[in-house]
Structure formats: structure tokens, C-alpha cells
Image (cartoon, rainbow, N blue to C red):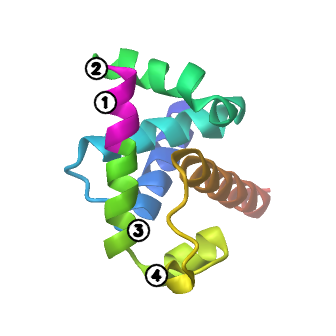
């Protein structure tokens, strides 16, 4: 049951990321998905991306913290430019054209993780 739930969470994350315009072929796509999974389990990692999140992802993918940070930033920039504007408004509460600029890596990861938590909570209530 836990494994099925984990797969469902990964599918939700992938769906949101693709809707937001993150191309699946980017390294940053895998890193963001891993970061969101980690944040969904423990939101503390979002508060310390440079000390906890990037090093853990770098270790999992046998790369450096700096490359992880840059790949995530690149994926967010691409999605910010090409993604579904309605999804950004729904997720972040402001539109791309507002001039506010793209969200930071930690904002992006935390927002998707929070959306997953909300969706899982709603799904759990429906099952009960």
C-alpha cells in the first residue's frame, strides 16, 4: 500500500511539473521531482536547500550540489517562460506577467510539495 501511495505521489508531481512546462528530458526535472518528494515527506529540507536538499540530491545522482542547484534553476526558468500560465496563477497566486519574477528554487519546490499534500489530504478524505 505504501509503495502504491509513493507511486501515486510521483505521478501527481510529474503531472504538475509537466503542466507547469518543465520538460521531462532535463536533468533539473529529475532533481525537482526528487526535491518535491523529499519536501513532501519533510518540509524542513526546503528551509535549508543548500545544507540539506542539494547535497542529498547530489549524492543520489552522483553529482555536485552546484550542478543540482543550477539544473533546478534552469528547469524553473524554462517552465516559467513556457509553462501553463493558469497553472502558475493557481499554484503561486500571481501571474507570470505580474512582473514579480520567477519563484526561487525553494519557493517552487515548497509550493509543489504543498499542493501534493493538499491533494493527498483531499483524496484521503474521499476514501474515508
CB atoms at circles 2 and 1 under 8 Å apart?
yes
Decide: few, some or many residues near mark 4? Use Cα within 10 Å; few <14, some 14-19, many ≥20.
Answer: some
The residue located at (41%, 78%) in the rendering is: 84
Q: Earlier in the sequence, mark 4 or mark 1?
A: 1
Reading the image, the residue beneath label 4 is 85
Residue pointed to by mark 2 = 63
Horizontal and vertical percent for residue 90?
61, 76
**Residue stretch in magenta:** 64-71
Earlier in the chain: of badge 2 and badge 3, it is 2
> Which residue is tagged 3?
80
- Is label 3 in a helix, a strand or a loop? helix
Q: Disc 4 vs disc 3: which is toward the camera? A: 3
Q: Nearer the viewer, residue 5 or 89?
A: 89
Left or right of residue 111: residue 35: left
| Number of residues whose C-alpha sits closer than 10 Å to that of mark 3, classed few (under 14), some (14–19) or many (20 or more) | some
**C-alpha span from label 4 to label 3:** 8 Å
Give the quadrant of residue 91: bottom right
Amino acid at each position: 500500500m505504501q509503495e502504491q501511495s509513493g507511486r501515486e505521489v510521483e505521478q501527481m508531481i510529474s503531472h504538475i511539473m509537466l503542466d507547469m512546462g518543465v520538460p521531462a528530458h532535463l536533468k533539473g526535472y529529475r532533481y525537482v521531482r526528487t526535491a518535491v518528494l523529499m519536501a513532501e515527506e519533510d518540509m524542513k529540507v526546503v528551509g535549508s536547500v543548500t545544507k540539506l536538499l542539494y547535497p542529498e540530491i547530489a549524492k543520489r545522482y552522483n553529482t555536485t550540489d552546484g550542478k543540482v542547484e543550477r539544473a533546478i534553476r534552469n528547469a524553473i526558468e524554462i517552465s516559467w517562460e513556457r509553462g501553463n500560465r493558469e497553472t502558475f496563477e493557481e499554484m503561486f497566486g500571481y501571474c507570470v506577467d505580474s512582473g514579480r519574477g520567477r519563484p526561487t528554487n525553494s519557493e517552487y519546490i515548497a509550493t509543489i510539495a504543498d499542493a501534493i499534500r493538499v491533494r493527498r489530504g483531499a483524496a484521503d478524505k474521499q476514501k474515508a
